[in-house]
């Protein structure tokens, strides 16, 4: 007798009356007869029919929601509605009981807040299993895209000795005794006595290290965890999140935009083709949610329509300067509806402005480029106007910023000046400067926040619901 997953049983056209074996968790047990069994391989359950006359009553009592069971039987065409095949059970064993009085995941709707507190069990629900299967598929699609396009996968270090990028929002890594750290003559903590002999932090981005590999291997990308101790308790920020950072030698800013757009379209296309069942489920869930809202707040597109819209339409490319003009003349700006009123060129865009551009003005993904130098990072290439840099941010409807990238400053003298202006000592980034001393060239890259992509692809509106165990201010449970 062969062991199958639910997904195999439902998709493989197995001959009627084949003897099959399966293990999974009970979703429901109805009328002392019908087990809805789920094993995570697919959204669907397989129905297992138990003739209670043939089974011990004590055993039947143990078939409760959440219990792990082992079932053998014949795969037959289903008599009932809702499924094509079912298992006529000849053998049932309860591998792990689940006390129905205390099992948190009851067969009813639970709030996302409640499920966050039970994140260790929430993937036993349809919504979270669908979201996490999509998360897995998207990661695969990302590696597939880069692999098929000649990129090498590079592992940037997670513990970093450079704090040039994230000063102020980094998590310290230390093995010193926090109660009694060694002190230097000035009375400060003496990090020369620490594990690495210097101050170290968790990385906020693998970009600087990825640049070193781009300048030798040509096309590379990182895909790993990054950490930010920013105290922004929003629905779009995590303290630990995963970032995808391609970096390419000899590529300029327009090339960078082309890459980002092609890449985003390709990974979304992948899940549209390969994760239909989960997407359709989430799409329906959102439509049901939408029906509870007043007309004006309802989404004009369904989830799948939104995804297709991204794959089928060009992203709108708009310079920062054009965007400021649009915002300045916008209704919410004139009526002082924005929290931050845009009155001058040079203002940093807040998420309310980004969302206005994407959701109200352009109604499609937008790539903003050529930002003022002083609101962007030091490593972005200065334009000839002397005041803007070759930065690009990609804004998505419902999400806001999903990608931040740039053509990098490849000129040694300009880079040194920019570092000096913000007091980054040259010796801290001597290796980064070396790239500009030896065989420098135009190069570009970007960072995509993986969880924001998963939010977009699943329609989930809180970033805590698209990562297995979210880390946010005051929360590191599990
Ligand atoms: P934001 O303005 O939204 O905080 P950022 O400008 O700090 O973003 P970058 O430093 O450019 O973001 O990082 C690249 C990408 O990483 C962002 O476009 C976003 O998708 C993602 N990202 C940044 N910070 C976070 C966070 N705290 N949690 C989850 N994703 C994040
Ligand atoms: Mn940020």
Image: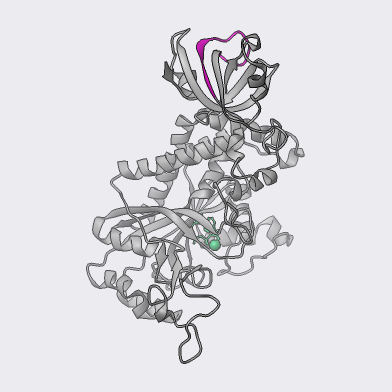
Q: Residue at x 55, y 65 (%)?
A: 229
In the image, is residue 242 above or below residue 473?
A: above
Question: Mainly helix, strand or loop, the magenta region?
Answer: strand
User: Residue 213: image x %, image y %?
Assistant: 29, 59
Nearest the camera: 326 or 231?
Answer: 231
In this rendering, the count of numbered labels is 0
Nearest the camera: 100 or 319?
Answer: 100
User: Residue 31: image x %, image y %?
Assistant: 70, 16
User: Residue 420: image x %, image y %?
Assistant: 41, 81
In the image, is residue 400 above or below residue 273?
A: below
**Quadrant position of residue 456:** top right
Segment colored magenta: 70-88
**Quadrant position of residue 210:** bottom left
User: Residue 205: image x %, image y %?
Assistant: 44, 61
- Classify the position of the N terminus by image quarter: top left
Q: How was this image coloured?
A: one colour
- Residue 11 shown left or right of residue 55 in the figure: left
Res 367 visible:
yes
Q: Residue at x 63, y 27 (%)?
A: 27
Q: Which residue is drawn at 71% across and 32% down?
A: 108
Res 86 visible:
no
């Amino acid at each position: 007798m062969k062991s199958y997953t639910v997904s195999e049983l439902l998709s493989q056209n197995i001959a009627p009356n084949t003897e099959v074996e399966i293990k999974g968790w009970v979703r429901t047990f109805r009328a002392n007869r019908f087990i809805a069994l789920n094993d995570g391989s697919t959204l669907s359950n397989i129905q297992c029919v138990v003739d209670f006359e043939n089974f011990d009553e004590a055993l039947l009592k143990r078939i409760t929601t959440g219990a792990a069971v082992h079932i053998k039987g014949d795969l037959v065409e289903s008599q009932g509605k809702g499924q094509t095949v079912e298992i006529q059970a000849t053998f049932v064993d309860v591998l792990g009981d689940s006390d129905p009085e205390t099992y948190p995941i009851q067969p009813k709707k639970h709030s996302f807040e409640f499920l966050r507190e039970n994140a260790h069990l929430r993937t036993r629900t349809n919504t979270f299993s669908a979201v996490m299967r999509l998360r897995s598929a998207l990661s695969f699609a990302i590696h597939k895209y880069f692999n098929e396009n000649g990129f090498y996968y590079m592992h940037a270090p997670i513990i970093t000795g450079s704090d040039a990028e994230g000063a102020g929002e980094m998590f310290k890594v230390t093995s010193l005794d926090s109660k009694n750290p060694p002190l230097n003559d000035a009375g400060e903590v003496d990090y020369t006595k620490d594990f690495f002999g210097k101050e170290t932090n968790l990385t906020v981005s693998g970009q600087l290290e990825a640049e070193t590999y781009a300048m030798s291997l040509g096309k590379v990308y990182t895909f790993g965890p990054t950490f930010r101790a920013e105290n922004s308790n929003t629905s779009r920020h995590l303290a630990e999140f995963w970032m995808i950072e391609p970096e390419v030698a000899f590529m300029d800013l327009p090339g960078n935009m082309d890459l980002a757009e092609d890449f985003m379209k390709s990974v979304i296309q992948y899940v549209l083709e390969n994760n239909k069942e989960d997407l359709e489920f989430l799409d329906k869930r959102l439509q049901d949610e939408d029906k509870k809202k007043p007309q004006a707040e309802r989404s004009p597109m369904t989830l799948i329509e939104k995804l297709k819209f991204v794959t089928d339409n060009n992203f709108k490319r708009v310079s920062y300067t054009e965007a400021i003009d649009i915002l300045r003349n916008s209704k919410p700006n004139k009526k002082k509806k924005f929290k931050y009123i845009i009155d001058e060129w040079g203002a940093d865009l807040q998420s309310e402005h980004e969302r206005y551009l994407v959701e109200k003005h352009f109604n499609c993904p937008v790539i903003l480029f050529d930002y003022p130098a002083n609101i962007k990072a030091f490593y972005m290439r200065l334009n000839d106007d002397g005041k803007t840099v070759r930065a690009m941010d990609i804004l998505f409807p419902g999400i806001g910023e999903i990608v931040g990238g740039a053509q990098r400053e490849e000129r040694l003298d300009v880079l040194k000046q920019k570092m000096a202006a913000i007091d980054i000592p040259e010796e801290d980034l001597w290796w980064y400067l070396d790239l500009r001393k030896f065989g420098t060239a135009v190069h570009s890259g970007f960072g995509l926040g993986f969880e924001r992509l998963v939010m977009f692809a699943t329609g989930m509106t809180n970033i805590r619901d698209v990562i297995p165990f979210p880390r946010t201010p005051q929360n590191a449970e599990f």
